[in-house]
Image: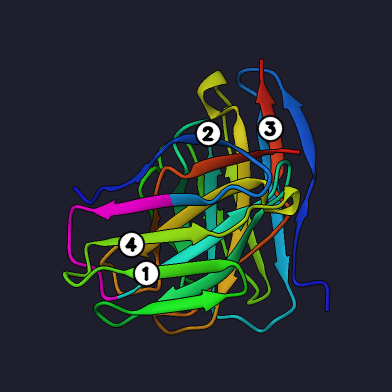
Amino acid sequence: NAGVTQTPKFRVLKTGQSMTLLCAQDMNHEYMYWYRQDPGMGLRLIHYSVGEGTTAKGEVPDGYNVSRLKKQNFLLGLESAAPSQTSVYFCASSYERERYEQYFGPGTRLTVT
Amino acid sequence: GQQVMQIPQYQHVQEGEDFTTYCNSSTTLSNIQWYKQRPGGHPVFLIQLVKSGEVKKQKRLTFQFGEAKKNSSLHITATQTTDVGTYFCAGPDGTGANNLFFGTGTRLTVIP
C-alpha cells in the first residue's frame, strides 16, 4: 500500500496563476483533509471531506477550492495564486469516526512569486 | 476560538538529556493526539490519550493527559539523535468530523 500520495512535490507559481494539487489514498478512508503548514503556526485545516461528493470549509478556506469526485482522491485548487499562499500543503486521511489517527501524505512545497 | 498552545517552541538538548514539551488547550478535550514530524517530512501519528490522568509509555517516550483534560505532556528520556523533529499535539476541533486542531509544535534539536 502506498498510503497517502501527493502530486506534485514542488511547484513555483507566479501571482495570478492557477494550479491543482492532487491527493490520493489507497486505504479506503472516508475522511480526507487539506492542511497548510507555515513556520511557527503548526498545521491549519483548509478544507475537508467526509465522503465522496462532499466537501466542507476548515479554518482557513479563503482562496482555495476542493473537490472529491472519487473516494480515493481529494483535489485542492488555487484559482488565482497569491504570495500569501506560499506554504507547504499536506493532505491527510482517516477512518470515518472520531478518535482515529490521521495519515499524512509527503507534502507539496508551493512558492508563489 | 479554540487555541492549543505548546511550550517551548524550540528546545536544544545534548544527546542523553531529557526533554519535555507541554500542550495547553483553551477548552476541555475529549482526547488528544501526538504527532512527530521529522525535518523535511510529514506528521506521523505517535499516540492518542483519552482518559483523564492517563499515562502511556512508548519505550523512552511518556505521554500524559491532565486530570482536567485541558493539558498534556510528552517526555523523552535520554534523547537520541533519532528524536530530532517537531512534536505536535492535536485535539478535536468540535466539528464532529474527526477534524483536529493542531498545536504550534515544539522543535527538538539533539546535539550529539
Indicate the secondary structure of the residue bearing disc 1. Answer: strand
Q: Is residue B96 magenta?
A: no
Amino acid under disc 3? Leu
Which circle, 3 or 1, is nearer the viewer?
1
Q: Residue furthest right?
A: A1
Crowding at mark 2 (Cα within 10 Å: few <14, some 14-19, many 20+): some
Cα–Cα gap, marks 3 and 2: 11 Å
Cα–Cα gap, marks 3 and 1: 36 Å
List the residue tagged with mark 1. B64
Amino acid under disc 2? Asp
List the residue tagged with mark 2. A38
Residues in magenta?
Answer: B21-30
**In this rendering, would B64 be left or right of A68?**
left
Amino acid under disc 1? Gln
Q: Are marks 2 and 1 on the same chain?
A: no
Amino acid under disc 4? Ser
**In this rendering, would B111 be left or right of A85?**
right
Q: Are marks 3 and 4 on the same chain?
A: no
Q: Are marks 1 and 4 in contact (CB under 8 Å)?
A: yes
Which circle, 2 or 1, is nearer the viewer?
1
Q: Give the residue displayed 38% in from the left and 59% down from the top.
A: B73
Crowding at mark 4 (Cα within 10 Å: few <14, some 14-19, many 20+): many
**In this rendering, would B54 be left or right of B47?**
left
Q: Are marks 3 and 4 in contact (CB under 8 Å)?
A: no
List the residue tagged with mark 4. B72
Q: Nearer the viewer, residue B31 or A57?
A: B31
Question: Colour scheme of this structure image?
Answer: rainbow
Cα–Cα gap, marks 3 and 4: 33 Å
